[in-house]
Structures are given as structure tokens and as C-alpha cells.
Image (cartoon, grey):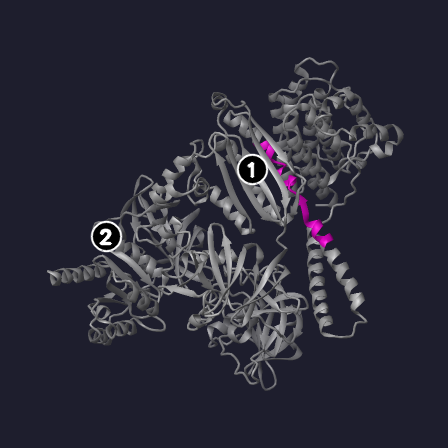
Amino acid sequence: MQAANANGAETGPTDEYVTVYVADTLFGLAIERVHDVFVPSGVTPVPLAPSEIVGLLNLRGRVVTAVCLRRRLGLPDAVAQDDKASPKMAIGLEQTGETFALVVDGVGEVLKLGADSREAVPINLDPRWRNLATCVHRLDGRLLVILDVDALLGFSAAGAKAA
Amino acid sequence: MDDLLREFLTESGEHLDTVDAELVRFEQDPNNQTILRNIFRLVHTIKGTCGFLGLPRLEALAHAAETLMGRFRDGLPATSESVTVILSTLDRLKAILADLEATGTEPAGSDDDLISELERMATAEPAATPAPAPEPVLPEPVSRELKPGEVSLDDLEAAFLAAPGPSEADFAAPVAAPVEAPKAEAPKTESPKAAAPKPATPRAEAAEVDSTKAEPAGDAEAVVATETTATGSKIQTIRVNVDTLEHLMTMVSELVLTRNQLLEIARRHEDSSYKVPLQRLSHVTAELQEGVMKTRMQPIGSAWQKLPRVVRDLSAELGKQIDLVMVGAETELDRQVLEVIKDPLTHMVRNSADHGLESTAGRVAAGKPARGTIRLAAYHEGGTITIEIADDGKGLDLAAIRKKAVERGLAAQADVERMTDAQVAKFIFDAGFSTAAAVTSVSGRGVGMDVVKTNIETIGGIIDIATTAGRGTTFTIKIPLTLAIVAALIVRAGEHRFALPQVAVLELVRVDAGAQRVERINGSPVLRLRERLLPIVSLTGLLGQSDGQGAETEQAGFVVVAQVGRERFGILVDEVFHTEEIVVKPMSAKLRHIPMFAGNTILGDGAVVLIVDPNGVARQVAQGIQGSNSHADADAESEAAEMGDAKTTLLVFKGGQGSFKAVPLSLVTRLEEIECDKVEWLGGRPLIQYRGRLMPLVPADSAITIRSEGTQALVVFSDGERAMGLVVDEIVDIVEERLDIEIAADRSDLIGSAVLRGRATDIINIAHFLPLAYDDWARGPKKAEQVSTLLLVDDSAFFRDMLSPVLKAAGYQVVTAASAEAALTILQSDVRIEVVVTDLEMPGRSGFDLVAAMRSAEPRLAGLPVIGLTGTVGADAVERARALAISDLVAKFDRSGLIAALAEISATNVSQAA
């Protein structure tokens, strides 16, 4: 528990998270890291790129690298419900001066959460998930997995091509 | 650090660079008061500012230098010795400034050595007037002096009095227009205000350097040139942070894109009421873009600034008399481009001085002027800038280069003799082609020109050589003006659009199933273009988008004929749209490793497209794609790279009792130097945390122990996600040699030994070390060539590379394939192959599938002996192998087992033949 909390911000009484969902899981992203929420469109795929990267898109005149949260978490791509497989929502994140779009299935509300509902990342989680999550919050009826934005965007260029 | 200090640092740095250059000129032209005045003024400014900022050490040094220069001004002859002392004083000043920049305070230390030397020189020789007197202490407050380039009226007055009068101008008249001189007199008398402010700041300093361009021959001309600058019109400048400019540039780029989008919309609507304002917006944007682009431009002279000093030092060091002539220093180019060519230019000038020019005695003997000349010239030509570096030395020794090229296996003797001189000269750009050995033997640097060439090519430039024996060598560099905006051809390949930079595009050819048809040689597409054969790559294939449908897409489409360096090739695309000026945006750090793309951009319709890097494609064409040796120009080097006995690049290191060992560089992932305290021991095995993983360490020799303190050199090998660190004593060198291995005695850790650079060197067998790190590291294929030729099939490039030397050492010719499909293609076309060694566990079609396909094919293939490589020899594998008549199953790391199996097969073949 201590180890898991080390990354989470525990100084303030409450932290705010933007919630997003992928498959059936609810994830939280620290609100101070979120710059934008938008509907991604016109994604240009990049051949030979790591599989996590779905492509590049034009966000108000800036070229943004779109990273698929599903693929990052090792989940299968969403079954194309409408014939366009184009993702529904994207979260604009910034890391080392570059802008990334995290493609998710949907965006929920912003939650204010205190330390009382926080739990360490369960140790039986898939290692891939464990590396990306900082902690878990117990909400009414469901769990919220808090993601570490830096870890999320910290995949190496050459890695995981096979996925 | 406060702003004032930062400003002072930037400014002083610039001043010192100028003084460096000016002093060298002054040394050659000691009577030129204008130069001296300029130097004096700059040093004085530095001194004044130092006093103001409370920097006593700098002030004392600057003061001593100023005193000596004051004496020059009063007529003390400037000797080479005294100039040297001043130059070293400047170096000391720079060192102190660097410290100041790093720490914010003036470093402790004493400069008494220099100061006393300067003082000794200032007082030693007799002079007309006493030294201290002429030092005009400027009446204005020192803070005024902060503005670079300002000079007191008194100083100017004194300078004009001291400056040679009209007679000088008359003398110079035929050479250059002295119109500026009278003008200078006029404002001085009429309006002091106009005369005082002088060109300043970087732009102006560049202009001062410009003046050197005009001094090829006589003193007189140089004087006039300087005079012109000194009295040049008032240039108003301000200093702007580069980040601000970059940001402005980005915003303008976005404005351009938005405008393009608007225009696109307007085109689709009939309503013309907003067309006029839109037109206006369009014009304003274009002008704005141009204006901002200009701010990024810098005169090339700023990259040349250090060269006079470099040449002077070299001239002393080499004992040659060298003149450096610079023409066109005002030619402007993009800051970014300038940064990239700065070092290559310095390197080339050094080379010219070092190798190009003969010794003074040699020149005299050859009936040339004793002083050698290096001429730098820059000028605009279309959308590019051309830079020439010419020397009047002896020219390249083409015969020696031809000989060397043959020796190094870059080309065959016959080819070399057929080549034109220009083609031969280009060999000096080959990596490891030591110009020192080939041309002169002054310095032994083996690297150099290849780096220069690479640097220039990364910014889309080209470099050319013209050389005449006994007359000199001229290097011509052509580079684009800017990297930020390029003209690009928009094409479609598969479902997506791509941008191809127009500089690389020579022409477009439409191909279809009819007359202009893409033909195939052993699966490699080629095109007949005006009686020559052009290798073709399909863009979709290159980007891994299509494999199976490659054949159909070649039926119709366009071939973009491109040229990169000496390589000429065609890129097959499905459709060509139009050309567009695109703003190049860099690739994300996550995508930068993909060599195919140079960046991305947003088109007028808002879509993001990727910019294809012609250099990346060229590399892929040259080395890629198995068996594509149908190169139109038949460049010997690319052929050599494919032949079995080609040179291998080897990493040489010291491992164990000072012996030299080597490993093929292609196997090495990285070289690392780690802190010894990072090494951890788990279960008695050393490990380090490396890029977020644990990496086992294995000593390259039993005699090596991992150091306990200091740093430890590692050679990192990796395959997929696994990595291993080979512990070595010291990394020595990288050599490119024809690998002639003598098989080693019975040691599994060595493949054998070879002579590299005259030293007996053990070639280590990585296959021995990998299982030490990971017990199960055995996924890769082994290659074996037998009898004469053998086909090695494995999906892992790592294992292909690893086994090739082993098999070659055992006397086989090796052909490799990365997949079952590729293997079948090769088998069908190459009749030399007598044995197949294949990995049985490959993704997609496995080795078993491959053998099954062979067995059901034509009799020649069906009868070929096959050796299977496998990580684990299980009962069912043995069963399947027997069913497919696989001659032998060998464990992946069993080097001797593989060679024994091959030997057995060849033995059977021989007995059958007999």
C-alpha cells in the first residue's frame, strides 16, 4: 500500500480526476494533466509505428499523436459498432512539450476523491496494468483505477510492436 | 543570474569572436588602423562592462590586453608573438566567461602570467608615445557603453585622424568603390549624432566579418572594405529570444494552415462576398510568413566567424602559409541549417589546410605562390544555397584513392578504372575511408568526410567534389535555404496520402500493364527507363501496408523517380495529386525511430499527412529487400555488401589479459558505460537495471572480473525484449575489414581468430554467451551453408547475423531468408543452394511448413537436404522431422553440432556423386 501510494498525490484532502472508460472499466486521470477533451477525427495512421499509436491527428492546427488506451492496456480493439472504427473520445495530455491524445471509449464526470476511498493497486492485477496504475478508488458500485499519465505515455519507441 | 549579466555574456561572447577574427586580419595587415580601432573598441567595451558589473578578473585581463593594443595603435609593430599572447588572453577571457555562465560568479584564479606577459610586451619595445596616455577613457557613463558597437566621438575622431587619408582611397579606387569614405567624413563634421552609432549586434558583426571577403589580394582593398563597413548606414536591431521567434514561426505556420482551410471552403461556395477580404487575408498571411521566415535567417558569416582563427592556428601548427578568403558571408540561410553545417564546414576547412594544401616548400617547388589559399564562397541559387570550399593545393591523389578503394573492396579494379575522376573522388566520403592514408599522412583521422556528408544529407543537402591534380580541390555543398517549409509532392499509396519532398524528385513516370511496365527480377521490381534499369520500391510495401497485393498495385500507378546521393530509384505510388508548400512539423519522439518519415504536416484540407524521407527510403532500397542487386548504376559498394565475402564491421574490445577480441557490429545493440555500484548480484549472477528491466551481465572472458568501482564498459546485445550485457575491459575501436577467420581451437566462446588492423584478434561467438545470460535464449534461426552454398532461414535478424560468421568460418557460402516465403522464392531462383538450414519455430509459416512445401515442389527442391534448428528437441518434433525427411535436428546454440551435421551432409553428397 505504501509503495502504491507513493505516486499518488496524497498531500491535499481531495484530488480531482477526469474519469474515462474503456471496455467496462472506469479510469481516472489527474485533472491537472488533462488539457483537452475532444472527439478525435481524421486520424492518419502511421505505418511501422508502435501498435499503441493509432496515428496523428490535427487538433486546432497542432499535430497530435493519438495513443490508444485499449492497446496500451493490452485490450482488444473495440468491436466496430458503427462501420467507422473511429474512436469516440480523446483526452489531450501533454508530456515533455509534446501533445498526445489518449483515445478512450468515453468520458465521464470529474470526481473529487479523498484518501479514505483509496486503495493500493491489487497485486493480482496484470503486470501491464499494475505498471500503469497508481491506485484504485472504491466508488459506489464500481471501482475507479487511477492511471499514471507519465507511465501511460512512457512506452518506448521500439517496444511492443508485436502487440 | 540576472538579465544584465546574461546580456553581458552573450554580447561579450560575440565580441570576442569578432576580435579573434579581426586580430588575425590585423596580424596580416598591421597598418590597418580601422581593424585595430575596431578591436580596441570591442575590448574596451568588455573592459568597461566588467568594471561596471564588478568582475575584477575579467577587467584586469581586458585592461592588460587593451593596453598592449593601445601601444599597437601608437605605432608599436604588431609581432606574431604579441598577437599570439593577445589571442591566448582572449581564450582565457572566454574560459572565464564560460565559468561565469555556468556558475554565475567569476571563477577564482590568477591571470598574472598573461598580464605580466602583456605588460612586458607593452613596455619592452620602444615606441613613439608612452603607453598609458593614448588610452581614451570614455567620458560617457559605462552603462552607455553596454550598447554594442557604440563608440565615443573622441575615439572616432582619433581614429579618423589616424586613418590613412584620401591617398589610400585613391589607391584603392580601381578595386572597389570608395564612395562610402567621403560620406563618413561628412556626418562627422555636420552631425556628430549620425557618426557615433555604428553597426552593432550580431547582424552588424556579421557584416564586419563580411568585409574579410573582399581582401583577396592587396592591403588597399581590405582597407576599403573595412572602411565601408565602419561607415555603413545605421542598422537598428534588437535582441530577441530564439524561443520567441520559434513560437512566432509556429503561430504563423498555423495561420497559413487556417488560411488554406478557409480558401478551400471558399472554393466550394458560390457566395463571393467574403472572397475579397479572404484574398486580402491570404496576401497578408503570405507576407507575414515571409517576414517571419526572414527572422530565422542568419548570414552564413556567423558560421565562418571562427575560421580565420582556426586557419591561423593551423597555419602555425603545420608550418604552412595559408590565406583564407571568404566571399558571400552575408548570404543568409535558416538558423537551423546553419547549426548543422557549422561543424562540417570547420572540418572541411581544416582538411583543406591539412591535406589539401602542400607545404610551403612543396608549393615553391611546384612553381606556385608560397602562400596557399583556401577560398570559401556562398551564394544563393534558386531555392538552395551553394557553399564552395576550394583550395589551390595539389588536388586529390586519385590514383591512391583508386588503389585504396580496390584494397578496401569498395569496387573492383575494372570498375575503378572505368570510373570518372569525379566518381573516384567520391570514395573519400565512404565511412572509414581514411583520407589521411589515401591522400597524405599528416593526420590519421579515419572518420571525417563521411560524417560531413551524413550531416549535409540529413538536411537534404548534397556535396560534390571537383579536383584537378596540382591545381586544387573544390568541394561544393548545396543545401536548402530552410528546413521549415519545403515543396512537396502529395501522393497516394494504398489508402493514405503522403508528402514527398520535391528536392529528391527527378521525374514522374506513369506505369501500366502496357508499354511502361514494371518488370520483376527474382521478385524485385524494376523499370526500364530510357534504356536504363531503375530499381523500384512500392511505397505501400515499404511501409508494410501490403504484402500480398504488391503485384497488382504495380500494374498501374506512378513511379516517382528520386535521387539521393548516387542512388537513383523509383518509388511506386498509386496516385499523384499536386505539389504544395508544406510546413514541416517534427515527428513525435515516439515515432522518430521510423526512418521512413522526415516529419508530418497539415494539408490545406486539415488532414495530417506524413512526409516520406527520401534518405530513409534510399537506405531501404540499397540494403533492404533481399536479393535486389539490380542496381542500375551497379555501384560496386552495394554489390559488395551483398556478396558473401564482403567487409564486415567489427567492434574491437579488450577482454581478458589485454587480448583483443571482436564481435560483428551488426549484432551489437548498444555500447554502455555503467557505474559499478549499479551492478547487483542476484543468486550469484550479476545484473543491472537497464531501461526498466533487469539485464544479466556476462564477462567476455573468464579472466575478466566485473569492476567494483569506477565505471564498467558493456557491450549490450538484445533480441526482442531480452538484453544481455557483455562485460569487457575496454572498447577499443570499430573496424571495417574483410573477415578472414581461421577456425579456433576447441573453444566454444570463440568463432575463431582473424587479423584486424594488423593485430591478431579473437572473434567471439555470441551464441556461447547468450545461454549464459538466458537459459532459453534459443528462438533464433541458424543459417548454414554447405558444400558451397547454403540457405539459412530464420525470422530473427539477430540469429541470422550470429550464425553467418560461424558458417562462413566453416567454409560455406551463406544466403539468408527471413521467412518461409522468402526462402521458397530464393530456392526457386537460386540453383546454387545445396543445403537448407531452417529454424523450425517461426511465426507464420514454420520451418516444418517450409520443408513440407519443398518436399511437394519440383524434384530439385524436394531432394535438398534440410537441417532443422530448434530450441527444444522434443519427441514430436523428431517425429515430424523424420516424416519430412529432415536430415538432422540441431539445438540452436550447438555450433559444433550444426557444423558436424553440415559436414555429414556434404560427405554424403560427395559419396553419392562418386
- Which quadrant is the C terminus of chain B positioned in? bottom left
**Same subunit: marks 1 and 2:** yes
Mark in the foreground, 1 or 2:
1
Q: Position of residue A56 (x, y in %)?
A: 58, 68
Q: In the rendered view, would you say B332 is above or below B859?
A: above
In the displayed structure image, the side of residue B130 where residue A19 appears, left or right: left
Q: Amino acid at mark 2?
A: Arg
Q: Chain of mark 1?
A: B
Mark 2 falls on what kind of element? Answer: loop
Q: Is residue B294 magenta?
A: yes
Residue B654 in view, yes or no: no
Dot 2 corresponds to which residue?
Answer: B747
Q: Amino acid at mark 1?
A: Ile
Is B745 left, or right, of B564 in this rendering? left
**Measured Cα–Cα span from mark 1 to mark 2:** 53 Å
Toward the viewer: A114 or B510? Answer: B510
The secondary structure type at the circle numbered 1 is: strand
Asked if B369 appears above or below B867 in the picture, the reply is above
Work out whether residue B805 can be spotted. Answer: yes
Residue annotated with mark 1: B389
Is residue B519 shown left or right of residue B762?
A: right
Which disc number belongs to residue B314? Answer: none
Q: Is residue B112 left or right of residue B232?
A: left
Q: Could you tell me residue B133's position as x and y percent? A: 78, 19
- Which quarter of the rendered picture does the N terminus of chain B lie within? top right
Percent of width and height locating residue B419? 41, 43
Depth check, front residue: B831 or B41? B831
For mark 1, does the 10 Å Cα neighbourhood hold few (<14), some (14 to 19), or many (20 or more) residues? Answer: many
Magenta region includes residue B269: no
What residue range appears in magenta? B290-310
Q: Residue furthest front?
A: B515
